Amino acid sequence: MRKPETASDDGAVTFLNARLLDPASGRDEPGGLLVRDGIIADMGPHLRRNAAEKSRVIDCRGHLLCPGLVDMQVFTGEPGQEHRETLKTASYAAAAGGVTTMVVMPDTEPVIDQVALVDFIQRRARDNAPVNVHVMAAMTRGLKGTEMTEIGLLKRAGAIAFTNGKNTISSARVMRNALLYAKDFGALIVHHTEDPTLSEGAVMNSGEVATRLGLRGVHKAAETIVLQRDVSLVEITGGRYHASGLTCAESLEVIRAAKARGLPVTAGVSVNHLTLNENDIGPYRTFFRVRPPLRAESDRQAMVRGIASGDIDVIVSAHDPQDADVKRHPFAEAADGAIGLETLLAAALRLHHSGDVDLLPLIRAMTYNPAKLLGLPGGRLEKGAPADLILVDLGLPWVVDKTVLKARSKNSPFDESKMQGHVLATMVAGRIVYEYA
Amino acid sequence: MTKPQPHATFARRHLLTCEGLTADEINALLDLADKAADSNRQVIKKRDVLRGRTLINLFFEASTRTQSSFELAGKRLGADVMNMNVSTSSVSKGETLIDTAMTLNAMRPDILVVRHHAAGAVELLSQKVDCSVINAGDGAHQHPTQALLDALTIRRAKGRIAGLSVAICGDILHSRVARSNINVLNTLGARVRIVAPSTLLPAQADRLGAEVFTDMSKGLEDVDIVMMLRLQRERMQGTYVPSTREFFHFFGLDQEKLARAKPDALIMHPGPMNRGVEIASTIADHSRSVIRDQVEMGVAVRMAVLEALARQLPNH
């Protein structure tokens, strides 16, 4: 990439000689793209070699130009656990990973269950974050799963969806009412499905690996049981529902069947569950302790097929910073969670390089699909769309080194892993916020 | 004239798990333990293999017999032995396992014997210290010296282990003793069965290398060894089994069930026993019970392990 000396007067930028990939239309062709006033002003083959007048020019050298990633599951430590991650550190990590929009989860201290706290996050993000930050608010007070939050007022304040965070709502009545009530406001309910009575005390997937390690496991049925219940509740309420992180083949079947019946149900999967399995835990590696837990290889493969077929709509990083103080413990006593903003794209690209998933559906699951689900204008290459873009060298080899990651906590399961594919530049609203050095 | 046998040795720095130990390594330890057992029956029991060495017993989980067994083993080999009982309260004071390990490491022990309630904790600790580490039980993971003392007890009573049929009965799910024993007995060529109600079996138990039975009469059919496990009191009341009465009825070792085993079958239990829960009192005191031999062999095996590890210590 050629670095221009100065930006043009009106901040216009022309990307020349790019491979344009638009997950919304399916466009995948050589061309160029003009950014002006923070939006995509023009694009197409006619701009491949011709820069618009008075614009800064970036020669893409044939690399991929596509919408920036929309990551709809990012945990930070702000407010309350700033030593793990702040909105600022997370958003710089996001920019470095090609994530131009991150949706932060309400699992903070205090829990984001009030209008004032949504305002707080938005103000902090506006002042500190180089990428777009949206808030997913709590659907029950304190994430306790008993009383509904002010879904209408929170939505008006800017909450983009509603979730119970890392906690599963065990009461079917509360879930039913939340779906019904949220429906009146067109609000999306996002749910982590794991039966709390089955998963109590469990620290990994149940099976031979857990048995050998002497660790308490949770069967994947704990996920499917709640998912089936929720689908039944969607059927009687008509509320919009998104299962935040599937991990197993059986859950995929539930989602497939629900979609076949035309229910407003969608599903996500974390990149960890697409690229890692329970064997990676090896001799008690706590960086591989995540929730829901890593499953068997056959389940990982099912998740990959779900992305390839489009039955699973969204890939998230499930970025969850945990510091050494809570990770350097015996496995059963360590915290759950893995960071992922900076490795989301490269880890997901493993599926492209292995030939398991075509580039278009892979990128779509990290851009257009989550944007559409959340009602965001980004995630597409289209005239008038926000200029949230990433330029990607799909083949660039690199090795993950936690010491250079921008996230404040370093609990990456991909540390020291070899990767292929890196963002060369990240643009948010027409402004370059990250350049690969 | 016989050729000199190549001397099999145990040349590891730590003893953390039985998974992956070779038959040669196990036999080397058992041979050493045999000698220790003999010397323990002498009037003068003390040797000086560990003279000048420091052994720390670090127990995060209360234990009377394992700790005293290691203490006696260390003292009989001439080591200075210190017992540290780190109750769970110090965890709530904020000191992590790794901090504790670093603190103890600074006291320059030669061998650390560690018991911890979390699986993998001893291995984690071993990565942070300079001395040799012996796992004296970590969660539901491993308890290597127990499996070795069980193997020694069997070998001395039966003259061999290969080809024997061993039934391990009771709470397999939570048992580190069962896991270590399955490893050792399989490696030495025994056929292992596990017998338990399904609620006390771990997931995919059949993948551990043992035949699984949920009917004890069938599980004990023609076995050479009946090895009972302790059922923790808090697991008796309805969560895993409905009652102690029902558990004893179906999974307690009594005369009737024992009759299914071979007439010369040995009865074993790692202790402490719950008489009337997993084992009838009369069976515990049966002529074929080797439960007290297990305790004796415990000291011998721990001496053997200490001696083998001491050979690997610097400046030996």
Image (cartoon, coloured by chain):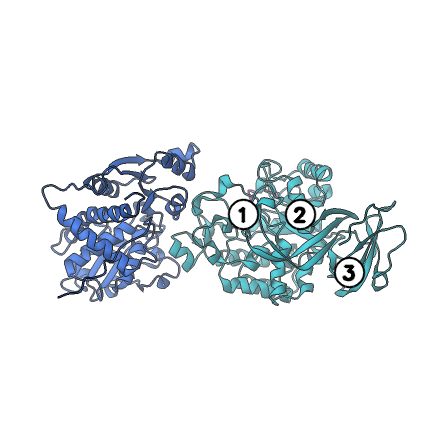
Chain colours: A cyan, B blue
Look at the image and tell me in which quarter the N terminus of chain A lies.
bottom right
Where in the figure is residue A274, as x and y percent of width and height?
Answer: 57, 59
Residue A64 in the image: above or below residue B129: below
| Viewer-nearest of discs 2 and 3 | 3
Check if residue A145 falls in the magenta segment.
yes
- Residue that appears at 66% across and 37% down: A117
The label on residue B47 is none
Amino acid type, callout 2: Ala
- Most extreme residue toward the right, as rendered? A53
Q: Which residue is mark 2?
A: A94
Residue B239 in the image: above or below residue A262: above
Q: Between marks 1 and 2, how big is the CA–CA gap? A: 17 Å
The crowding category of the residue bearing disc 3, from other C-alpha atoms within 10 Å (few below 14, some 14 to 19, many at least 20), is: many
Where in the figure is residue B259, as x and y percent of width and height?
Answer: 16, 63
Amino acid type, callout 1: Gly
Q: Answer left or right for A391 relative to B4.
A: right
Q: Which residue is mark 3?
A: A18
- Residue that appears at 16% across and 49% down: B37
Where in the figure is residue B45, as x and y percent of width and height?
Answer: 14, 42
Q: Which residue is mark 1?
A: A337
Q: Chain of mark 2?
A: A
Q: Answer left or right for B7 relative to A182.
A: left
The crowding category of the residue bearing disc 1, from other C-alpha atoms within 10 Å (few below 14, some 14 to 19, many at least 20), is: many
* Residue range of the region highlighted in magenta in the rendering: A144-148
Magenta stretch: dominant SS?
loop
Amino acid type, callout 3: Ala
Which secondary structure lies at badge 2? helix
User: Circles 1 and 3: CB distance less than 8 Å?
Assistant: no
Which secondary structure lies at badge 3? strand
